[in-house]
């Protein structure tokens, strides 16, 4: 049986990765497979972490660090440090308070939480609990009216941006979930989608296509849908799931306010690049025309530093904070964010970077991995 959440943080938890074992002990096997698994053989899932090891920081000494800080403005919202909470679905799978605990943590740390379309707590309930800005992650629904209904609810509740996931017209091949027989328990559901027509599933007989012509791609969004959404809302659109520089260029043309370099946490198509590998190519294409965020594999403040040095404006952390949530609720998420910020500031100081603007390619040791 899974253990109950911690009532206090033990001293053995000194880094974000330390939360993983505590989280595992507090989740069912199937829920753990859902949270921690990736697509197929999970090469991309592992690559997201391994990419940071290949990038080295260039330390600098005797630099003037007086008056330094980590503040930034992101889509008109001032933030104290460049780490946001990524959208993660069904958080009641890992803790009884679910997304409400994460909202409390984001509020305490004064950063943005991106609420998932597939949250297990209603978007309005999260907004009422929030004391810091919220963004809403949007999946296009099969019917445009349902998509628009979600948008209007987010607008009315005070969400500051729409984070449109563009890299998941269908789910990837998630063998770890299949082997454990993952299914949602009766008390966990995507409450924001109640009453809406579900996306099509597909069960193909031998000799039939499981994807094309099966209905599995009915409602899959296109650039035309982004144009429609841009015309339908006053909220800025953040397109999440960009890996190709060509798609970054199309996102700019479509009126995106920002993009997120993401491979869906390694849960979509296996053997695609790690996000840190794709980031500099996408950032070069964007050339400062809009903010570039990224996610994938972040467990250390040095990971945040390296992402900014390679062209990211800010980062989103996903599994790391959910491990904290599973282990200790809101306090665990706060602790995760606090450790990341502290480690990031230490990395800045030892690399001689007084502000975020000082973090560039010259803050990294020259290496073919980042050529």
Image (cartoon, rainbow, N blue to C red):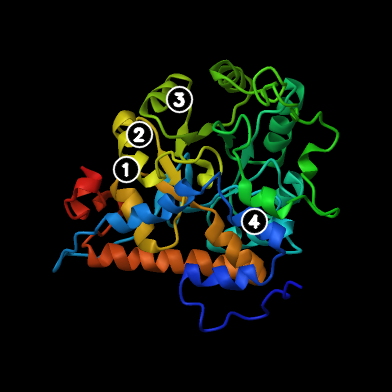
Q: Which residue is mark 3?
A: 251
Mark 1 or mark 2: name the one nearer the start of the chain: 2
Per the model, the C-alpha gap separating discs 1 and 2 is 8 Å
Q: Nearer the viewer, mark 1 or mark 4?
A: 4
Mark 2 or mark 4: name the one nearer the start of the chain: 4
Mark 4 or mark 3: name the one nearer the start of the chain: 4
Q: Which residue is mark 1?
A: 311
**Which label sits on residue 346?**
none
Q: Quadrant where the C terminus lies?
A: top left
Instruction: Answer left or right for 14 relative to 189.
Output: left
Instruction: Answer left or right for 78 relative to 350.
Output: right
Q: Which residue is mark 4?
A: 33
Per the model, the C-alpha gap separating discs 2 and 4 is 31 Å
3 vs 245: above or below: below
Dot 2 alpha-carbon crowd within 10 angstroms: few under 14, some 14 to 19, many 20 or more: many
Per the model, the C-alpha gap separating discs 4 and 3 is 33 Å
**Which label sits on residue 282?**
2
Residue contact at pointers 1 and 2, CB within 8 angstroms: yes
370 vs 83: above or below: above
Q: Secondary structure at mark 4?
A: helix
Q: Residue at x 58, y 58 (%)?
A: 106
């Amino acid at each position: 049986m899974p253990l109950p959440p911690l009532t206090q943080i033990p001293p053995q938890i000194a880094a974000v990765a330390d939360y993983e074992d505590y989280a595992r002990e507090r989740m069912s096997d199937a829920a753990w497979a859902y949270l921690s698994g990736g697509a197929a053989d999970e090469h991309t899932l592992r690559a997201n972490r391994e990419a940071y090891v290949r990038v080295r920081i260039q330390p600098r000494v005797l630099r003037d660090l007086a008056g330094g800080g980590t503040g930034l403005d992101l889509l008109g919202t001032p933030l104290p440090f460049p780490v946001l909470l990524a959208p993660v679905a069904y958080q009641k799978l890992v803790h009884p308070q679910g997304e409400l605990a994460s909202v409390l943590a984001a509020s305490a740390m004064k950063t943005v939480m991106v609420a998932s379309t597939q949250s297990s707590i209603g978007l309005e309930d999260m907004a009422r609990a929030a004391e810091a800005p919220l963004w809403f992650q949007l999946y296009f629904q099969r019917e445009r009216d349902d998509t628009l209904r979600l948008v209007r609810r987010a607008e009315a509740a005070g969400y500051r941006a729409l984070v449109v996931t563009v890299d998941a017209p269908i789910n990837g091949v998630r063998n770890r979930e299949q082997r454990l027989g993952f299914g949602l328990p009766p008390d966990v559901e995507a409450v924001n989608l109640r009453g809406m027509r579900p996306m099509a599933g597909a069960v193909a007989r031998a000799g039939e296509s499981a994807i094309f012509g099966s209905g599995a791609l009915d409602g899959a969004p296109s650039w035309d849908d982004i144009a429609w959404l841009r015309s339908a809302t006053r909220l800025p659109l953040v397109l999440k799931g960009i890996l190709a520089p060509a798609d970054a260029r199309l996102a700019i043309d479509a009126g995106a306010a920002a993009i997120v370099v993401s491979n869906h946490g390694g849960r979509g198509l296996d053997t695609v690049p790690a996000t840190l590998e794709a980031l500099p190519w996408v950032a070069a294409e964007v050339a400062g025309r809009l903010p570039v965020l990224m996610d994938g594999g972040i467990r250390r403040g040095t990971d945040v530093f390296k992402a900014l040095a390679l062209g990211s404006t800010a980062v989103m952390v996903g599994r790391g904070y959910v491990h904290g949530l599973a282990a200790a609720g809101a306090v665990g998420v706060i602790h995760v964010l606090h450790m990341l910020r502290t480690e990031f500031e230490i990395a800045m100081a030892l690399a001689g970077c007084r502000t975020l603007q000082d973090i560039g390619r010259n803050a990294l040791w020259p290496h073919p991995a980042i050529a």
